[in-house]
Image (tube, rainbow, N blue to C red):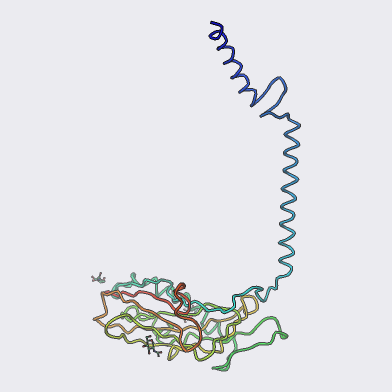
Amino acid sequence: MASTEDKPAANKENTSSWKDSIYNPRTGEVLGRTASSWALILLFYLVFYCFLAGMFALTMWVMLLTLDDYVPRYRDRVPTPGLVIRPNSLDISFNKSDPPKYAQYVQHLETFLQRYNDSEQERNEECLAGEYFLQDDSDDMMKKACRFKRASLSLCSGLSDTNFGYHEGKPCVLLKLNRIIGLKPPGEPYINCTVKKDHPIQMHYFPSGGRIDKMYFPYYGKKAHATYAQPLVAVKLLLTKEDYNKELSVECRVEGSNLRNNDERDKFLGRVNFRVKVVE
Ligand SMILES: *[C@@H]1O[C@H](CO)[C@@H](O)[C@H](O)[C@H]1NC(C)=O
Ligand SMILES: *[C@@H]1O[C@H](CO)[C@@H](O)[C@H](O)[C@H]1NC(C)=O
Ligand SMILES: *[C@@H]1O[C@H](CO)[C@@H](O)[C@H](O)[C@H]1NC(C)=O
């Protein structure tokens, strides 16, 4: 009997202690602590986090003081540049009789080549072909750049043929090596493209032989070498009727130097694979 009478009382106590744990009106505690206790805790964390932020800012500041704007501090031992193409698509596919289908590629190439206009490149030096363009550190921090003119890309310059061959089903693709500060590729680097197919496809390279002249090396960095013009190689794929309506797989590699172009893990080091499909 007594036990059944006790139950409601126990229940009431339970609910009131549960409520008290949130806010206890008798002691004025919130979540088991008084207001001044909470204020102390908040103050502690505020000071603690301010201290951490201060430490962080201080170390960053000291780090930045040791950096040189002109030369990166840490670099890989053996830099190998990636090879990239323009138009910026690894899947070039269009209808050669339908200009809107290839307009984006033509537009992209034209925009990309603006910085190689004569008006832009006249500011740059006429360098000695076949020699590295080495510049002394003791000189001016700003380095001179060698001239690369669009006209050297001939049929792929967009000057004589403003459609870059897309309208005739013989599209141009531009290739460039990513910039690597201080890289001086030995030998005579050139670009060689192949199409994985039974019968070989004719190609034209501009400049001739797909050569990348040594005078565009070394590169001295974004800040010191502000007007630097990356050397380009254009490949014009001389496709014929038999090549249309098929997906062609093209691979281009840097050869003639010691630059790596067959890395298992990185498929873009010194080479690039892309697909071309032309329909009429
Ligand atoms: C390519 O475009 C032409 C002209 O618009 C059209 O007649 C032809 O059917 C198109 N070809 C394909 C495969 O879509
Ligand atoms: C670059 O040359 C092209 C073709 O001659 C011209 O259409 C374009 O306006 C020029 N761009 C600049 C920025 O000079
Ligand atoms: C280009 O590469 C292909 C395939 O690797 C090779 O057969 C050809 O001799 C190379 N051409 C040049 C000029 O190196």
Which quadrant is home to the C terminus?
Answer: bottom left
Residue at 73% x, 38% y is 41
Q: Residue 140, located in which quarter of the rendered image?
A: bottom right
Image position of 30 (left or right of 103):
right
Q: Position of residue 45 (x, y in %)?
A: 72, 43
Q: Answer left or right for 78 relative to 159.
A: right
Front in this rendered view, residue 19 or 248? 19
Where residue 141 sits in the image (x, y, percent)? 70, 81
* 102 to 21, vertically: above or below: below
Ligand 3 shows up in the quarter that is bottom left
> From where the camera sits, is residue 132 visible?
yes
The foreground one among 128 and 45 is 45
Residue occupying the point 35% across, 80% down: 171
Horizontal placement of 108 versus 128: left or right? left
Q: Using the rendered image of the protein, determine whether residue 123 is visible from the camera's viewpoint.
A: no
Q: Residue at x 24, y 81 (%)?
A: 242
Q: Residue at x 30, y 82 (%)?
A: 239
Residue 186 picture location, percent across and down: 54, 89
Position in image of residue 116 (x %, y %): 51, 81
